[in-house]
Amino acid sequence: MNRTLFPLFCLFFAALLSFDSSAQKRPLVVFVTGDHEYSGEQTLPLIAAELEKNYGFRTKVLKAYPDHNAEKNIPGLEALQEADLAVFYLRWRQLPKDQLDQIEKYLKSGKPVMGFRTTTHAFNFPKGHESESWNAFGEFALNAPPGWGGKANHTHYGHESSTDVTIIPEAAKNPILTGVAPAFHAKSWLYQVQPSYPVKGSTWLLMGKPVNPNTTKAYDNPVAWTGKNSFGGKVFMTTLGHPEDFQIESFQRLVINAIHWELGLKVPKKWKGKIDINVPYRQ
């Protein structure tokens, strides 16, 4: 090699190594999506893009294949092996064992987990199926009810209803709630998780009050909480997640804050501004 070019080559190689090392140090958030109803495979990529653009994260978004209604295939779950945080927005999947194994490995690592709305009933295997225990994913991974209905009476108050959300006073100083309005209105119809959930030891952050419920027996329920799951991993779970919720700046900030908290990072003091999210509801 020409002696005059050798120093330049060394500088270029060192810069390349430095860039690669820097990239590897950035946290990797893997989003796992597949729901029939709430367009999670469209809203979460916009959150991922915001994390990459303004907060220095690496992200990867996995989607049900060939579309959101495909219940038995989410390609690329091996990405969880390198993930620092796994974010789930699932509904009634029946994934094959090799794909479930990837999720199980991640959970058993004790790394943090985040879930949205229908992830309380992420899986729906028939009775007697070898993977039936995965129907309780909401409970063992996210401190939520173990699937829809059942003994926990996990249900909602009708598609014509919505939810008034308020910060629980005892949680007001929680860093996840930095910049979140004390009260806001969400399109999501309220999920009933009480009286048995979130599991004991969880920290409630936001309370939901049903608006125009379909029953006179409706009552308030928590809509966001944190805790430790069955594997010792940090949990952030919210039963909100209608695509119109993602248009609400306070909800956007809640999600960005929670991702930082899950990874043991300081919640950003300065908000980068409202994210442009305009995704349709499918039903």
Image (cartoon, helix red, strand yellow):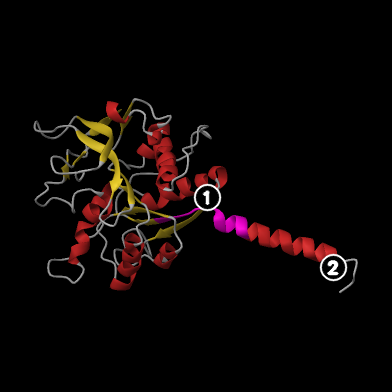
Q: Measuring from the top left, give residue 139's x and y in whole percent.
A: 21, 52
The magenta stretch is: 21-31
Which residue in the structure is indicated by mark 2? 6
* Mark 1 nearby-residue class (10 Å; few <14, some 14–19, many ≥20): some
Residue at figure coordinates x 11%, y 52% from the top left: 150
Q: Is residue 277 left or right of residue 14?
A: left
Q: Residues within 10 Å of mark 2 (few under 14, many from 20)?
A: few
Whether 151 is among the magenta residues is no
Query: What's the CA distance linking mark 2 and mark 1?
Result: 34 Å
**Front residue of 237 and 110:** 110
Nearest to viewer (mark 2 / mark 1): 2
Residue ID at (52%, 50%): 57
Residue 258 location, x and y as percent? 40, 42
Counting residues from the N terminus, which is met first, the one under dot 2 or under dot 1? Answer: 2
Q: Nearer the viewer, residue 72 or 103?
A: 103
Q: At which x and y percent is residue 166?
A: 29, 28
For residue 182, above or below residue 189? above
Residue 106 appears in view: yes
The residue under the point 22% across, 37% down is 190
For image coordinates 86% across by 74% down, the residue present is 1
Identify which amino acid the numbered label 2 is placed on: Phe
Whole-percent x, y for residue 231 in the image = 28, 57
Residue 278 shows in the view: no
Viewer-closest of 65 and 267: 267
Residue 57, label in figure: 1
